Amino acid sequence: MNFTRWSARLPGTQRRAAARSDRGSVPAARAECPAQQSAPAVADLPAREILDRVPALVVLLTGPDHRIAYVNDAYTEAFGPRPAGAPAEEALPELRELGLLPLLDQVLRSTKPRTVKSRKVPAGRSYTFHCTPVDTPEGHGILVFATDVTDHAEAAERLRASERRHREAAVTLQRSLLPDQLEEPDDLRIAATYQPGGTDAAVGGDWYDVITLGGGRTALVIGDVMGRGVRAAAVMGQLRTAVRAYARLDLPPHEVLQLLDGLAAEIDASQIATCVYAIHDPTEARLTFASAGHLPILVRDENDGLHRAAEPTGPPLGTGGWQHASGTIPFTPGSTAVLYTDGLVERRGEDIDHGVELLERALAGATGPPKVICDRLIRALGVTADHDDDVAVLVLQQPKRTGQSADLFRGAALDLLGGVEAAPRARAFASGVLTSWRFPVELHDIGVLAASELVANSLQHGTPPMRLRLRRTDRRLIIEVTDGDDHLPRRRRAEPGDEAGRGIEIIATIASSWGSRRTPGGGKAVWCEFALPT
């Protein structure tokens, strides 16, 4: 067989040897060393002998049906002998299984070489295939040159497996710092989703939480620690734990952020964190919130009107020297609110306000329960599995009660002016309301007692105006008294001779839970809850 023309494309010394062998044997230069004189020069070897000795797999194919013109020893050893002149479709099933036959057609038509990297052959080895067009005495042909890259491929697979394990561990760490299961307030339907960004092992600092405060109120939190890595996740975990602790104090949103601001500076002043802390009170038809450099809350009301929470917003946590302030946004029955991190709306090369506008449009057309809305917003904003930033979304709805549901969720309130008639009026009011709600006798009596004790405590230690409020849900009875004094009561053991100090002790004993908080305007609210029989 004549290799003159196609051997010109062989690499390195093989090409030069093939060219010389076709012109005839050229004597090797004489050397003074006898050993060198006895060794054959590369130029003396014919092309077939060279290709038979290389460890790579070599096949020469000719013609439009890729008939076998030559197969070297390495190929024969790997796949067995192949008949000369047979078409590749029949005689080279391994190439067909690897999907290389269409590639051979492309190389023959374009006369441009193509390479297919790291394909595993049926024998279990991995090869990189180089398909190079050549000219042969029989016409145009293709030289298939396959290099064994099994060791490299296995090492790469081990590396990928290691990266997958590290990423799974990182994501598990991140998710372990988020709530396993969201708390379920009586008056809200809530769903949240978190999607880690990128494909590396660096976890992010996005987080969210839902905290029931008692008295029917709920705290909703979402935040983002900038950057990625275990350090960001650790800061996030500490901030989330701190928020839950501060929430138990039942402070206004801006005071919670003020405490977080100081803590963030102590944890790591170099880590920038943003946060929104909001409180939902079902009796106020609004969300009270404070923001530390975070994106605005979005609300769609029952008439499909869209609202974006405006000021106030302060700088990110940890900057110090800033007095945060609380604001409000309407949140009436039938409304849906969305809290989110910047990974949902921020894209490189685009204004983040444009992303928020896209989210508003997506929220306007998203209907259904919170979980469905979460998924729709993620899809609408183009967040995929290979998204390069972490995304956290928290969706809440306040259902509009009708029918039987409206019978289960009720409220009643009585303004008290003080004086000797206040306590009897409160007892009579509470008795009438609980009777109309058809509570069992035991719960009726204990509810009247709690209302009486709370009003008596307010009359003794508080100042007008006073209000008694009763509220029921499908799971609990809530009794609350507000007044104009900001001194919060505390539970203490009354001595036998004390004439006061037993009211809160009684409340703490008979109620499922109780608490107090300061209200805007310098007053306070004291409340207690009773679980309803199931």
Image (cartoon, grey):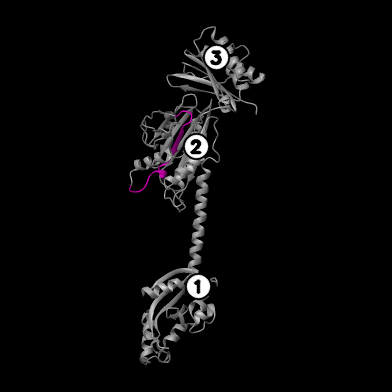
Residue linked to disc 2: 209
Does residue 530 appear to the left or right of 150 in the view shown?
right
**Camera-side mark, 1 or 2:** 1
> In the figure, 100 relative to 522: above or below?
below
Q: Judging from the image, what secondary structure is the residue with disc 1 in?
A: helix
Q: Amino acid at mark 1?
A: Arg
Crowd rating for badge 1 (residues with CA inside 10 Å; few <14, some 14–19, many 20+): some
Q: In terms of sequence position, does the residue under pointer 2 or pointer 3 come before the other?
A: 2
Q: In terms of sequence position, does the residue under pointer 1 or pointer 2 come before the other?
A: 1
Residue linked to disc 3: 455
Residue linked to disc 1: 96
- Residue sitting nearer the eye, 418 or 263: 418
- Residue sitting nearer the eye, 227 or 107: 107
Distance (Cα) linking label 2 and label 3: 34 Å
Q: Amino acid at mark 2?
A: Asp
Distance (Cα) linking label 1 and label 2: 55 Å
Q: Which residue corresponds to the image point at 54% horizontal and 71% vertical from the top-left?
A: 122
> In the figure, 10 relative to 361: above or below?
below
- Residue sitting nearer the eye, 143 or 105: 105
Taking the view exactly as shown, the residue that stands out farthest to the top is 420
Does residue 145 appear to the left or right of 503 in the view shown?
left
Residue 399 on the magenta span: no
Expressed as whole percent of the image width and height from the top left, the position of residue 41 reads 40, 88
Q: Amino acid at mark 3?
A: Val
> In the figure, 109 relative to 411: above or below?
below
> In the figure, 20 relative to 246: above or below?
below
Q: Which residue corresponds to the image point at 46% horizontal and 38% vertical from the top-left?
A: 239
Distance (Cα) linking label 3 and label 1: 88 Å
Q: Quadrant of the N terminus?
A: bottom left
Q: Judging from the image, what secondary structure is the residue with disc 3 in?
A: helix
Q: Judging from the image, what secondary structure is the residue with disc 2 in?
A: strand
Q: Quadrant of the C terminus?
A: top right
